[in-house]
Amino acid sequence: MRMSGSIGKVFSFSVGDLCRRLQTDRDKGLSVEKAAAVLQKTGPNVLTPSHKTPEYIKFIRTLTHGFSLLLWIGAGLCFVACLIRKIIHDELDTDNLILGCVLVTVVVVTGCFMYFQEHKSQKIMESFANMVPPKATVIRGGETMSIVSRELVVGDLVDMKFGDRIPADIRIIHSQGFK
């Protein structure tokens, strides 16, 4: 949800001036129609999603983290030793070749397992976040109603009580026992 630059410092306005600028009523709030129009104009009350790391980068990271890096180095040394033996003695060093292949296989298998486990955990966490959408109690058209927080708009009167999560950047215009 975007606010125009002219009302960016809402804390410095009087409540009456703020209500005039936001075209809202201090007691009745926005009308349902006006709230729908503002929502259409400014968009939903959501945070801009952060940049997501591409999946192939995540996969490469699982193949090259900590101990896996040492295993890659060990496999590389095994292949180099095999190659040196082939060049100098003109015979294949199967022990180093097999050891190098085993190390590469271990790194790839554990990397795949880690990647799929992390991917699965990430999907579970995303499903938890979307399971119960946060709600907000607002006054629109003089009626108190509960809406999904993403539908809050600039100018809404938000009614909060102890234990409620703050659903957006808001200006407190009236409080009772607020600490």
Image: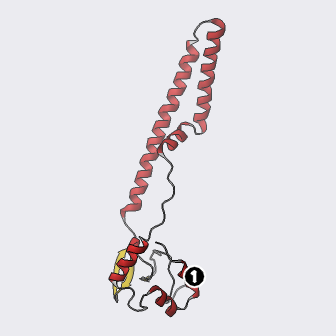
Residue 98 lies, with reference to residue 46, above or below; the image says above
Q: Nearer the viewer, residue 41 or 44?
A: 41
Q: Position of residue 3 (x, y in %)?
A: 50, 76
Residue 108 in view in this figure: yes
Numbered disc total: 1
**158 left or right of 85?**
left
Element type at marker 1?
loop
User: What kind of residue is marked 1?
Assistant: Lys
For disc 1, the marked residue is 9
Counting other residues with Cα less than 10 Å from the Cα at mark 1, is it few (<14), some (14-19), or many (20 or more)?
Answer: few
| Extreme residue in the top direction | 90
The residue lying toward the viewer, choosing from 95 and 20, is 20
* Residue 85 picture quarter: top right
Establish if 1 lies above or below 176: above
Quick check: 103 above or below 69?
A: above
Q: Quadrant of the C terminus?
A: bottom right
- Residue 145: image location, x then y, percent: 33, 81
